[in-house]
Amino acid sequence: MVTARTGNEQRLRDLALLRRVRDRIDRDYAHPLDVEALARQVSMSAGHLSRQFRLAYGEAPYSYLMTRRIERAMALLRRGDLSVTDVCFQVGCSSLGTFSTRFTELVGVPPSVYRREAAMATEGMPSCVAKQVTRPIRNREAAVTNGP
């Protein structure tokens, strides 16, 4: 059927474009990025890009970008030689409040607590193992623990 083939070809083209967007986010996470600019890069509207990206990767482009930034921030905080503010700006966030809120949602503790506790928890662990063990949970917020 001609329409089925055309639909499949379009879907494959869209997936290739979405992969380009994801690769750009992975590469340029520390630079200012916005969905409109990413969409222009692949000749899509921002709304269409967001919908298609969510279908392909399970989260919106902005959420994916913030996850990348938080993963990198976790690695920098584990080193222990940078302040939370320095890490925030180094990973491309312009608001310490937004960074701290998103970090806490993904990781389960504020960045200052993570910095203090992660250095001890991963001491002596190779960085490649520490990265895997401490990777944030994607597509779910950290579980909320209720008191006694």
Image (spheres, rainbow, N blue to C red):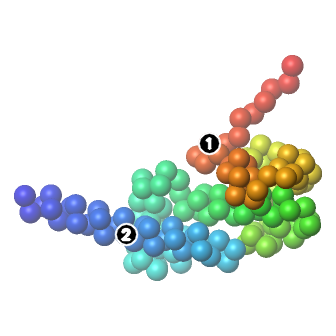
Q: Helix, strand or loop at disc 1?
A: loop
> Label 2 crowding class (10 Å Cα cut-off): few <14, some 14-19, many 20+?
few
- Where disc 2 sits, the SS reads helix
Which residue is pictured at 84% across the width and 58% down the height? 78
The first of marks 1 and 2 along the sequence is 2
> Is 83 drawn above or below residue 108 in the view shown?
below
Q: Give the quadrant of residue 69.
A: bottom right
Q: Quadrant of the C terminus?
A: top right
Residue that numbered label 2 is attached to? 16
Name the residue carrying label 1.
140
Q: In screen coordinates, is 113 left or right of 143?
A: right
Q: Residues within 10 Å of mark 1 (few under 14, many from 20)?
A: few
Residue 117 position, x and y percent, is 89, 47
Relative placement, left or right, of 99 versus 66 is right
Q: Pick whichever, 21 or 114, lies toward us.
A: 114
The amino acid pointed to by label 2 is Ala
Residue 48 visible, this angle? yes
Instruction: Evaluate whether residue 102 shows in this view.
Output: no
Q: Name the residue type under label 1.
A: Arg
View extreme (top): residue: 148
Q: Residue at x 75, y 33 (%)?
A: 144
